[in-house]
Every structure is written in C-alpha cells, then in structure tokens.
Image (cartoon, rainbow, N blue to C red):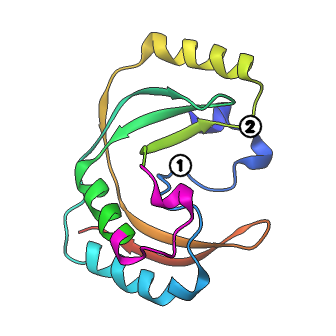
C-alpha cells in the first residue's frame, strides 16, 4: 500500500513508526542501550491499525499500541531537556502511506482507502535508530523483540 501511494523519490525507508524525529548525536550510545533493554527478551507490543488519518498533504494509518506508547514515554523522560518541541510533545502513532502531495490528491487517496478499511492487528518487530546524513539514512542500531 505504501509503495503504491508514497512518492518514489521520498520512499527510502520501509514502513515504520517514528518515535522521535531528531535526537542529539550525544545520546546515541545511551539510546542504543535503552532500546536494547526495552527489547531484549521482551515480547513485541500489541499494536492495531484503527483507522486513517489525514496529514494534510498525505495519509497515514492510525496505530494504537499502548505498550509502545509506554516505551516512548520512558525515553521522553530519559532524554528530557534534550528533545525538540515536536519530540517532547504528544505522540500520534501512525504509519505514513502518502506524504508531500497536493491536498486534493491526499483526500482522494484517503477516500479510496476508507472504502475498504478494516481495523487489524499489526506486528511491531523491533526498535531501531538511524542517523540522517542529509540524504540516505544510515542504520545506527536495531533491536528485535523476542
């Protein structure tokens, strides 16, 4: 679904939930440690796609994952004072399936997807961190749930 609607030139990562948009490089080692602690021997958090949400110039699947929200809140507390306002604020878990398009196109895609939408369970395989290098993303760490 994502590949069908996401602009190809912007589709450089697999579908994902973004926990944070910009953490300072100085927390990289601590983040890696904390993600490892959150996943090592831990069953994957329950998650459910519950609906669609408008991004204005795009469309996303709304995700409900209370256990993942708790993990993120722990990270927010750990990195308090180091987060951007966007990352310190309320989190709306979602998987973007279309972005950076004209709003009229986004509305049409949302209407088309809404016709056949059925809530369903989804799997959260793990947690990862990435470095943004002004172009391609570079993997920093990857931590899979049990």
Reading the image, the residue beneath label 2 is: 100
Quadrant of image for the C terminus: bottom left
Q: Position of residue 114 (x, y in %)?
A: 47, 15
Q: Residue at x 34, y 54 (%)?
A: 124
Q: Position of residue 123 (x, y in %)?
A: 32, 49
For label 2, the crowd category at 10 Å Cα-Cα, with few meaning under 14, some 14 to 19 and many 20 or more, is some
Front residue of this view, candidates 37 and 125:
37
Reading the image, the residue beneath label 1 is: 15
86 is within the stretch colored magenta: yes
Q: Residue at x 76, y 43 (%)?
A: 8
Front residue of this view, candidates 127 and 8:
127
Quadrant of image for the N terminus: top right
Q: Which residues are magenta?
A: 77-90
In this image, 127 relative to 27: left or right? left
**In the rendered image, which quarter is residue 93 located in?**
top left
Helix, strand or loop at disc 1? loop
On screen, 136 above or below 32? above
Q: Position of residue 119 (x, y in %)?
A: 32, 26
Q: Residue at x 34, y 71 (%)?
A: 77
73 is within the stretch colored magenta: no
């Amino acid at each position: 679904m994502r590949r069908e609607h996401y602009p190809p030139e912007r589709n450089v990562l697999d579908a994902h939930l973004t926990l944070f948009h910009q953490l300072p490089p100085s927390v990289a080692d601590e983040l890696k440690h904390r993600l490892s602690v959150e996943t090592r021997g831990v069953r994957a958090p329950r998650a459910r796609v519950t609906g669609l949400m408008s991004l204005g110039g795009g469309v996303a699947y709304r995700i409900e994952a209370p256990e993942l929200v708790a993990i993120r809140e722990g990270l927010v507390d750990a990195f308090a004072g180091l987060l951007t306002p966007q990352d310190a604020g309320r989190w709306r878990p979602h998987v973007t399936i279309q972005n950076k398009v004209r709003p009229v196109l986004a509305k049409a895609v949302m209407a088309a997807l809404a016709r056949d939408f059925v809530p369903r369970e989804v799997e959260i395989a793990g947690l990862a961190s990435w470095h943004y290098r002004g172009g391609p993303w570079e993997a920093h760490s990857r931590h899979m749930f049990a």
